[in-house]
Amino acid sequence: MPKFYFHLRGPDGLDHDDEGLDLASVEAAYLEAFKAVPGMGSDLASTAKNPIRYGFEITDAHGTVLMAVPFAEVLDRGQKRTKQPAKLQLHKGRAEMRRTAGLIVELREAHAKLNVTLAETQRLLDIAKRTGR
């Protein structure tokens, strides 16, 4: 099962999650973050911090940001959505571009390995046909 990390992003920067959770999918990680927000929001509010200014950055074991879960997304359900600040959109876009570039590299490597396996399989089939096996 993959491990997901739930880093807390706030006005003072990023508080890293060093433990993480083993979960079945990124969707399960999102649901875990979604469930944690009300309690954490309450804790932040009790210390006079505005929980709307916080959010989780969910990463994989390599530190790749898979998604952000702003507390506002959970705490402001049913209210009109506001446009995200350009700086946050840029940050998310760059993270997504890095993630996509990494996935492209992985796909190319997997494709190359499959081509080698295919060539070897074809070679073995040709031998089997020639020898009648």
Image (spheres, helix red, strand yellow):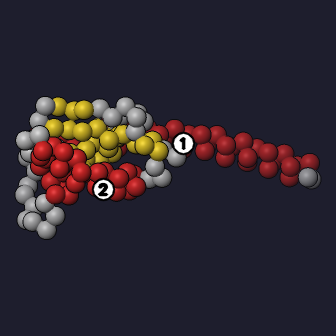
Visible residue check, residue 13:
yes
Amino acid identity at mark 2: Lys
In percent of the image, x 27 and y 42: which residue is there? Answer: 57
- Residue 69 appears left or right of 17: left
Q: Nearer the viewer, residue 19 or 115?
A: 19
**Residue 34 at x, y percent in the picture:** 28, 55
**Residue 58 at x, y percent in the picture:** 32, 43
- Residue 118 appears left or right of 71: right
Q: Secondary structure at mark 1?
A: helix
Amino acid identity at mark 1: Ala
Which of the 4 quarters of the picture holds residue 3?
top left
Within 10 angstroms of label 2, few (less than 14), some, or many (20 or more) residues? Answer: few
**Residue 50 at x, y percent in the picture:** 8, 45
In percent of the image, x 17 and y 50: which residue is there? Answer: 42
Which of the 4 quarters of the picture holds residue 117?
top right
Within 10 angstroms of label 1, few (less than 14), some, or many (20 or more) residues? Answer: few
Q: Secondary structure at mark 2?
A: helix
Counting labels gives 2
Instruction: Residue under label 1, please give it.
Output: 110
**Residue 113 at x, y percent in the picture:** 59, 40
With respect to residue 56, does 17 lie above or below? Answer: above
With respect to residue 62, does 58 lie above or below? Answer: below
Q: Which is more N-terminal, label 1 or label 2?
A: 2
CA distance for labels 2 and 1:
36 Å
In percent of the image, x 84 and y 45: which residue is there? Answer: 127
